[in-house]
Image (cartoon, rainbow, N blue to C red):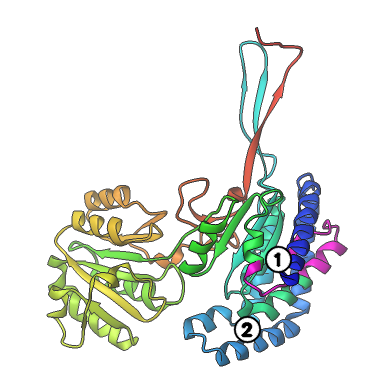
């Protein structure tokens, strides 16, 4: 084993033990103490805003030189508004109810044993993420409020931004009573550090990866620790024949162009064949206005000569850009079948005024979030009232959809007796 890898392993395992010790203190920290820590962290971020933006500018410049895409640079970029959103997010998390110590169920057995099921922190959570520096703040804030220690490993493209944010939170938190080791950032850009982290099941309870499909698949394949994930966001909307076409156009446009680099942005539009005469031309005009490249099936391409023919791969693709696949379908059943085959179980919706079709769609589409007459862009922790989110899960165990505080807890059983023995 080379010397550098030995050093990485030694440092990360010390971090893991430090986090584990901190998590045991955090588990019993009172709500008021946790809230005060989060507020102090928020104030520190506000005060350090100029320095944070300076560090982010270095990352952006390096990213441009490295040829990062426009979508990646957008995810990486911070400005005064985004920095303020991070600090406000911490304050909002502080205002939420504490998820730890909730009595989930309570029963008394015939023999007199009293059994309580109580929510508890998970312990130590590892977050592996790309690009977005706000994840450093969002993840730490949510983990701490739920009584968990966190080990953060951001992408090399955001190294300077993540370093100053983590340092800012850590110093303010420790000054306010946060146990040392509760928030730690892996300072290695060497990818082998991720491999080491994924094998630390002696001290890390859960791994949450946030980034591209390649990163997430690598984490799942290599981790000996449970992983919460979503591989990609191939999100759909289905325009039914019976709907308000003006509302449909507004919803579809927002879902595609409001922030195309987000995982909850629209990637495939399904249009009922009976909706085409009224909807097709206004929709095509709107997409041209916003610079969206359309790729359609044979029936849709007939409506405009500038539409590129779509192939099979287009319907599996998460573009994260101003590109939209379009397919004409004959019924709600066909729309459901398409989504369940090509979708990523992330965010899908129906635009319709026909209640039976709406109910059928919402019950039969196998996705974490299913919408009726609304943009898919709402799949977001803050939009769901969770404050920031730790991530979005397309798994079914143990969390699904945007993950907030409750999803960062587990539970244990507390059993009270007065001398019972089993016969």
| Crowd around label 2: few <14 · some 14–19 · many ≥20 (10 Å) | some
Identify residue for label 2: 79
Residue 102 rendering spot, x and y as whole percentages: 66, 39
What secondary structure is marked by label 2? Answer: loop
Quadrant of the rendering where the N terminus is positioned: bottom right
Residue lying at the far front in this picture: please name it: 1
Q: Earlier in the sequence, mark 1 or mark 2?
A: 1
Q: Is residue 359 left or right of residue 50?
A: left
The alpha-carbon separation of the residues under discs 1 and 2 comes to 43 Å
Callout 1 touching callout 2 (CB < 8 Å): no
Residue drawn at point x = 70 percent, y = 58 percent: 150
Quadrant of the rendering where the C terminus is positioned: top right
Residue 120 rendering spot, x and y as whole percentages: 68, 42
What secondary structure is marked by label 1? Answer: loop
Question: Of the numbered discs in the image, which one, if any, rests on residue 1?
Answer: 1
Residue 367 rendering spot, x and y as whole percentages: 38, 54
| Crowd around label 1: few <14 · some 14–19 · many ≥20 (10 Å) | few
Question: Of the numbered discs in the image, which one, if any, rests on residue 225?
Answer: none
Q: Is residue 15 left or right of residue 122?
A: right
The span shown in magenta is 168-192
């Amino acid at each position: 084993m080379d010397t550098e890898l030995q050093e990485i392993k030694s440092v990360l395992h010390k971090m893991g033990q430090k986090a584990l010790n901190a998590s045991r203190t955090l588990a019993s920290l009172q709500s008021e103490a946790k809230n005060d820590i989060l507020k102090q962290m928020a104030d520190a971020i506000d005060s350090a805003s100029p320095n944070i933006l300076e560090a982010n500018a270095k990352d952006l410049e390096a990213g441009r030189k490295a040829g990062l895409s426009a979508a990646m640079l957008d995810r990486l970029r911070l400005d005064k508004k985004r920095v303020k959103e991070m600090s406000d997010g911490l304050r909002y998390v502080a205002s939420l109810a504490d998820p730890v110590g909730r009595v989930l169920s309570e029963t008394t057995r015939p023999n007199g044993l009293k059994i309580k099921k109580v929510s508890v922190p998970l312990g130590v959570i590892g977050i592996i993420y790309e690009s977005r520096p706000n994840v450093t703040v969002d993840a730490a804030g949510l983990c701490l409020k739920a009584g968990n220690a966190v080990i953060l490993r951001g992408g090399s493209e955001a190294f300077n931004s993540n370093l100053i944010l983590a340092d800012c939170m850590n110093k303010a938190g420790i000054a306010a009573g946060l146990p040392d080791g509760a928030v730690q950032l892996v300072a290695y850009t060497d990818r082998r550090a991720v491999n080491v982290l994924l094998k630390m099941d002696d001290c890390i309870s859960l791994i949450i990866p946030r980034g591209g499909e390649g990163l997430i698949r690598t984490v799942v394949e290599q981790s000996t620790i449970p992983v919460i994930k979503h591989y990609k966001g191939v999100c759909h909307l289905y325009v039914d024949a019976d709907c308000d076409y003006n509302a449909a156009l507004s919803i579809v446009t927002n879902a595609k162009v409001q922030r195309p680099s987000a995982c909850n942005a629209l990637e495939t539009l399904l249009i009922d064949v009976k909706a085409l005469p009224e909807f097709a031309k206004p929709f095509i005009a709107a997409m041209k206005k916003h610079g969206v490249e359309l790729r359609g099936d044979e029936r849709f391409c007939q409506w405009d000569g500038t539409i590129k023919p779509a192939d099979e791969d287009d319907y599996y693709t998460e573009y994260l850009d101003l590109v939209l696949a379009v397919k004409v379908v004959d019924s709600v059943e066909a729309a459901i079948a398409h989504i369940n085959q090509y979708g990523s179980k992330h965010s899908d919706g129906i635009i319709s005024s026909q209640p039976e079709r709406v109910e059928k769609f919402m019950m039969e589409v196998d996705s974490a979030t299913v919408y009726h007459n609304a943009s898919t862009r709402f799949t977001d922790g803050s939009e769901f009232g969770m404050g920031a989110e730790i991530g979005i899960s397309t798994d079914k165990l143990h969390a699904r959809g945007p993950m907030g505080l409750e999803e960062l807890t587990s539970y244990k059983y507390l059993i009270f007796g007065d001398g019972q023995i089993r016969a």
